[in-house]
Amino acid sequence: MILRILNSYCPYQVLVVCAVLAGEHLYQPPQAIADLPFENPTPAWHENITPVSDRESGLRPLEPASICSDNECQPRGTLFQWSYGTSFSGGPDLDEPLATDRPDFTEASSTVGRGVVQLELGYTYIYDDDGTASSKSHSLPEPLLRYGILADWLEFRLGWNYSSDQLAQLNDISGSEDLYLGFKIGLTPQEGILPEMAVIPQMTVPTGSDQFTAGEVLPGLNWIYSWEINDFISTGGSTQFNRAIDEVTTNAFTEWAQSWTVSYTLTEKVGAYTEWFAFFPQSAETAKPEYYFNGGFTYLINNNVQWDIRAGVGLNEAADDYFVGTGISIRFL
């Protein structure tokens, strides 16, 4: 306040002198401060406050989107972690062989990684005889395009297929199936007995031929989980539900699917698996539950190319009698 008054009344030529006078007026020696009419400048109520740590208050520091150590940062591999902290693990490892969704029914619980393209192709022959009529089906090329976008834990999925059905005493039916779209989200890495998990929001859109299209969008959700037991064996499963159409009445219903698979590492290049899976229609008018058992082998040509074969049988009357197939998967880094 005194400086403001002096500045308004002192000419520019004597501004320095005014500042010196103001400084002398404002200066208070330490003894003068000690003589102020209170003993402790800190208010008395402040003495009763006990500092509270972040953990006691329930606060959690924001987890970073990447791991940084030794001046190097790595992106987060999964969306979540089982343990509290900032040490992230899991997710795709591009130095290891590719992890494919085929040839078994259970999808892989990991994503391909950001910027990575993985193409999986195959052929399946299916035979069924219900005692009154038989059918033979050819399914190809079963392409599934997987592309990592935005983060290592997110991939875009695009699938399409062409099918040919040979029905006894009837004309053959062939054409394209509805387009498949989805996103795979890597949820958690494996940590001890806690599984590696992923979830796939998915749907088919009515783009197929008249004989094979559902005529409407059929959404669904697929939850995948797996455990690596040791270097030889791993296991996992999937639980999913999808909107489906009854082939006889054309009415919609919900179809649940459950699977469980066991994978074996036989050599550095050869792997095998055995698997059970089933379909459970809910509120369907004519569709019945179907149960299957299948197995197969994989051969790793190199870290980015894998060839596979598989075969399976139906376990009840409503299921197809058997199927066989082969395929190849290629990863582009």
Image (spheres, helix red, strand yellow):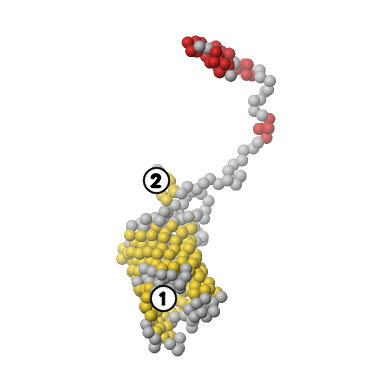
Residue 310: x and y in percent read: 38, 74
Q: Residue 108: give its label.
A: none
- Is residue 199 at least partly visible in the picture? yes
Coordinates of residue 298 in the picture (x, y in percent)? 36, 69
How far is the residue under mark 2 from the one under mark 1?
A: 54 Å
Q: Residue 266's spot in the image, x, y percent? A: 37, 68
Residue type, numbered disc 2: Glu
Spot occupied by residue 154 in the image (x, y as percentages of width and height)? 43, 57
Q: Residues within 10 Å of mark 1 (few under 14, many from 20)?
A: some
Q: Residue at x 39, y 62 (%)?
A: 146
Q: Earlier in the sequence, mark 2 or mark 1?
A: 2
Whether residue 23 is visible: no
Secondary element at tag 2: strand
Neighbours of disc 2 within 10 Å: few (<14), some (14-19), many (20+):
few
Residue at position x 60%, y 47% in the image = 58
Q: Which residue is mark 2?
A: 72
Where 137 sits versus 77, above or below? below
Indicate which disc residue 210 carries.
1
Q: Is residue 38 above or below residue 302?
A: above
In the image, which is nearer the foreground, mark 2 or mark 1? Answer: 1
Q: Amino acid at mark 1?
A: Asp
Position of the C terminus, as image quadrant, is: bottom left
